[in-house]
Structure formats: C-alpha cells, structure tokens
Image (cartoon, helix red, strand yellow):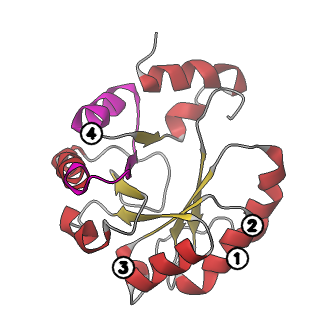
Amino acid sequence: MAEAGADMIHIDVMDGHFVPNLTIGPAVVKALRPHTDRPFDVHLMIAPVDPFIDAFADAGADIITVHPESGAHLHRTLQRIKDRGVRCGVALNPVTPAGAVAPVLGQIDLVLAMTVNPGFGGQSFIAEVVPKIAALRAMIDGVGRAIDLEVDGGITAATARLARAAGADLLVAGTAAFAGGAGAYGANLEGLRGEP
C-alpha cells in the first residue's frame, strides 16, 4: 500500500475483549517495521491499554491512539505514550461524545473519529457521526495546535467526501483501499482522495 501512495499505515490492534475481534500484537508490528518507512499509525482497541504502550512503542509505532474507555486515567496513558517519544491520539467510538477529548486537547497529536463501531472491517459508514467530526474540527481549530483529525470506518469515495467536508485531515480505508487487488491500490487511493 505504501508503494501505491498511502501516506501512512494504519494498524488496528484488537484484543477480543475491548472489541469482539482478535488481531495482531507488537511482534507483528515489529516484523512489519523494516518493510516501509511510512509512519505506523497504531490504533489500540485493547483494555487495559497501559501495559502494552511500551511494547508497541518498541515495535516501531510512530503514533499510538487509545480510547478513553480503555484505561482508568487517560491523561496518564497519553503521557506515557509521549514519554516514549511517540505521537499520541484519542479515538472516539460513534457514541462517545466529542467533548471526551476536550480535557486532553493540549496533550494529543491526533483525534480519531470512528464512523463504525470498532472491531470488524467492511462495515457501513454511520452518517450520524458527521456532525461530531465537524464539532471536533471546531474544537481543534479553537485550540490553535497542530492536531490531526482522522476518520475511520466505512470510508468510500462518497463517504470520504463527507468526512473531508466536515473537517477530516486523514482518512483510514480498508475495504475500499484493497478492492480489486494490488494493481488497483493506486487508483483506489486516488478515488478516496477525490483525485481523477
């Protein structure tokens, strides 16, 4: 995907507890690291999250994103990530209000708005989250810090336009990016970016 023009590699880590699916751990992230110089955007859908921060930082994560619900003390979790020299983010499930990130906007580098309930690929975009994306954009702009606004879930060419119009900086795409096999990756990414 990097060769097709992806700006970064988003890696979903699921524990079968915080979300119902089970995916990869730090050993796989470490094994992937030598194969690309693209930033690794590691989304930890695990609870408790704190015991795994060091392992994913050691494995080569450039960004570690956590959910407010994945630990007892979000400030402490984010500080631990920052102490490792890694950018940190907060992910908001569709029903988690935008205000959940307000107390940590001075600390984070990224907000991830989930437009599906996390845990499985191939889900449909939840359009009711679009106003929250716009609210997050306003919150970020009001802080005056460089904070990326990322949107993940059900991203297609059509929903990418909705997310960008609401203020998204980064889009995460799985199903739409990989459709048609390796020969189609570049065209898929161009379509998601709105390029001809």
What residue does disc 2 label?
59
Q: In this figure, which residue is indicated by the disc labeled 4?
A: 167
Crowding at label 1, few (<14), some or many (≥20) Cα neighbours within 10 Å? some
Label 2 and label 4: CA atoms lie apart by: 31 Å
- What amino acid type is highlighted by mark number 3? Glu
Left or right side of 4 for 30: right
Q: Where residue 18 sits: x, y (%)?
A: 46, 77
From which residue to which does the magenta span run? Answer: 141-166
Name the residue at 50% across, 50% down.
Answer: 121
Secondary element at tag 4: loop
Q: Are marks 2 and 1 in contact (CB under 8 Å)?
A: yes
- Residue 108's place in the image compared with 175, above or below, is below
Q: Is residue 180 magenta?
A: no
| Residue type at tag 4 | Gly
Residue of label 3: 69
Q: Position of residue 173 (x, y in %)?
A: 49, 40
Q: On the image, which quarter does residue 188 sit in?
A: top right
Q: CA distance from mark 1 to mark 4?
A: 32 Å
Q: Residues within 10 Å of mark 4 (few under 14, many from 20)?
A: many
Q: In 3D space, how far apart are the residues under numbered discs 2 and 3 (Cα atoms)?
A: 24 Å
* Mark 3 nearby-residue class (10 Å; few <14, some 14–19, many ≥20): some
Please report whichever mark, 2 or 4, sits nearer to the chain's N-terminal start.
Answer: 2
Q: Is residue 74 left or right of residue 142?
A: right
